Amino acid sequence: MRAFFRIELIDQQAEPGRRPIPECGPVRDAGWLRRHASQFDLVLYQFGNSGFHDWMLELLRAVPGVVVLHDFFLGGLFDALARQPGGAGVKARALFHAHGYPPLLQLRDDPAAVNARYPCNLAVLGHARGVLVHSAESQRLARRWLGEQGGRGWWRLPLAREVPRPVSRRQARAALGLAQDAFVVCSFGLLAPTKLNHRLLEAWLASDLAGEPLAQLRFVGAPADDDYVQRLRDRASHAGRAERMTVTGWVDDATYALYLAAADVAVQLRACSRGESSAAVLDCMGHGLPTIVNAHGSMAELPAAAVLQMPDRFVNGELVAALEHLRADARVRRELGERARAFVAREHAPARCAQACHQALQAIHAAVPGADSLAMLPRRQLLVDVSATCQASRITGIERVARALLREWLADADAPVRIEPVYLKRSGGQWQYHYARAFGAALMNIEAVSADELVRFSPGDHLLALDICAGPLVEAQAQGLYERLRQSGVSCRVMIHDVLPAIRPDLFPASMRPHFLAWLDAVLGWDAAICVTHAARVQLRQWLREHRPERAGLPVHCSWHGADFSPAGTSQGEWREPWQGSGPTVLMVGTLEPRKGHLQALQACSLLWQAGVEFNLLLVGAEGWQGIEASERGPVLELLKALRGHVHWQRRLFWLEDVDDQQLATLYARADGLLAASWDEGFGLPLIEAARFGLPALARDIPVFREVTGGRARFFQAGTPGELARALRLWLADGMMPRPGTTYWPGWEQSAARLIEYCLAEPRQ
């Protein structure tokens, strides 16, 4: 490259004044580059996955440059940074910056597996003016991890290897103490399960070579794990071939070259490639060694004429056949080695690589600053508005749904977008979105590693209003926030849990309806709505036709909630179910408010208790209509008075106002039946949760309850307490039949996946 550039070498770890390359100046340190950065047109960083490069990350932030990405996965680099003084948390922050919440869960539960799963390279790519890689595999990984824009504008640069001068095999073998007539199979590089050294040993032992006294298998390299190498030795010893299977350990460059000259065949296998290009394979080929590889990672890009290439996921028999084929035919070995040597001389010659690098650097230098920045950004985002949920002091139905969906999304390492909970916050009189990082970390039971900073929106992002935060959202809409987002390429969708305040105002406080209608009008101007049941979708479409005909064409989808009730966390201290009376126990789960039908249910139960029917009624749910004017709370206060003043209060009638998920699961498991008496609902989550516990249900005959139970419940129609009492008596007398059976309803994992599809789809009916 000296033919194209004046070059200064920077190496923080080098001995000051050292001149490792003839005709180049002395090696400089990072401080020197910081002081003289303005003198240079380009800075070229060589980044690999090890601590040798740890000092370069801080320098790259201060002096951005072009990155040669030798390894796509850089977790080992951040391990080295974490071991430095003050490095605590640096890897967690890098993982979160690059990949969001999933790797933090794995870092908590299985830290040893994180580096193999997540590239953790965005802290490097985010400061790169351009990127050079050695293989198409790295570009494929960029698209996989950074989205379709990933790898755009990256340049592929062959890994430079010089074809060495031929070394006499006789001399090499004499120097290594190998018999001149031995047949030597070598594998070069670090010994580790990902190099499949054990597969090579098994194939060698199963082949004809194992029976040849002069056949030798040499693993030339250092072990990554001493136990792994010991297992190799034990296997060879058990087969009676220990003296002909050798692990050399680390060797210097001269000894490495001798083995390359002395071997008859090289075998270089890989699994779990992380985007690296194998210098060892090219060294084997450059020395004219016939080389067996599997088509894994960048090795799949090698020409079939220059290597003996097996499938990526080969079986041992294929490797046995390859070894025996090359052992039997010296002409095939010679011709394969000649083609390999010619390929390296042609495609990987340093002069050719320097010319390609010069071309790439010229193009990067000429590009408009920031033109390639899209290639460095994280994948597009699904921003989940949980403004109400993350600030709720009590968890009710909608908040439980939001939390369940978020738990699935934030743990999904294979989600097609980066998922972030966000919330509205007023700053300087303007409503803006902030990342809900503290809430997300608490929800997933991990340590927060990033602050609740302002959301960075990009074209192609998606916003989903998952709960109802009416006041702030309406004000933000009036300030033009969502219009600006949509004009900048951000799609906005809303989850409609129900439209009952609009169509059944009699079931809600009078002051609630105008706030709900204002919220509904605000979100109806967005790209699409997603209802939680077909029944809710029918109600919304009908209301649109009658009251907002200009929005009747709004795309409205349906995405059901999950049925699997997975309690999060554990209950505090001892806890027992509260009922004391004899007979079955009937649960009612839901906020205590008129819509849920508690008062009619209580009156019906009173009639049955007066008639001597023995059963217990347990209400589970928070007091409703809190935070509204006292003058409007009459129906709730009437219900509470009827409960606490009831003759069977705390004998057959119980109310648990605040239970956690574990306690609710216990109640579902130990109760005998569920009563769903709501006058109307958007979903009816307790019905399907109860069904997962085998709990039979008596439900009011409304469309949404028919839908969510699939008809697997006893249904009633009751305009009076007496009619409900008769239905309840018959149900109890019939053994609370029917049983729910195996529910057909999807789990939260399926629900979350379906909802993402609607969030990312093109808006249409």
Image: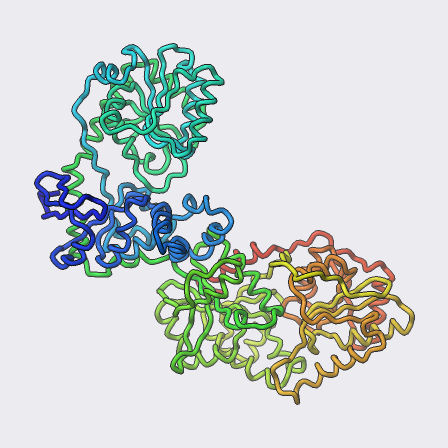
Q: Is residue 608 left or right of residue 711?
A: right
User: Is residue 297 positioned above or below 521 on the image?
Assistant: above
Image coords of residue 238 (percent x, y) = 49, 18
Q: Is residue 16 left or right of residue 300?
A: left
Q: How is the image coloured?
A: rainbow
Q: Quadrant of residue 352?
A: top left
Q: Looking at the rendering, in which quadrant would you find the N terminus?
A: top left
Residue most extreme to the bottom: 631
Q: Is residue 568 left or right of residue 257?
A: right
Image coords of residue 431 (percent x, y) = 42, 78
Q: Is residue 591 left or right of residue 274?
A: right
Residue 294 visible in the displayed image: no
Pick the front one: 275 or 189: 189
Image coords of residue 681 (percent x, y) = 66, 71
Residue 1 visible in the displayed image: yes
Q: Quadrant of residue 21?
A: top left
Q: Residue at x 44, y 54 (%)?
A: 416
Give the mark count. Answer: 0
Q: Residue at x 33, y 55 (%)?
A: 123
Pick the front one: 184 or 725: 184
Q: Residue at x 48, y 77 (%)?
A: 473
Pick the front one: 84 or 95: 84
Image coords of residue 555 (percent x, y) = 50, 67
Q: Residue at x 30, y 58 (%)?
A: 374
Pick the front one: 418 or 223: 223
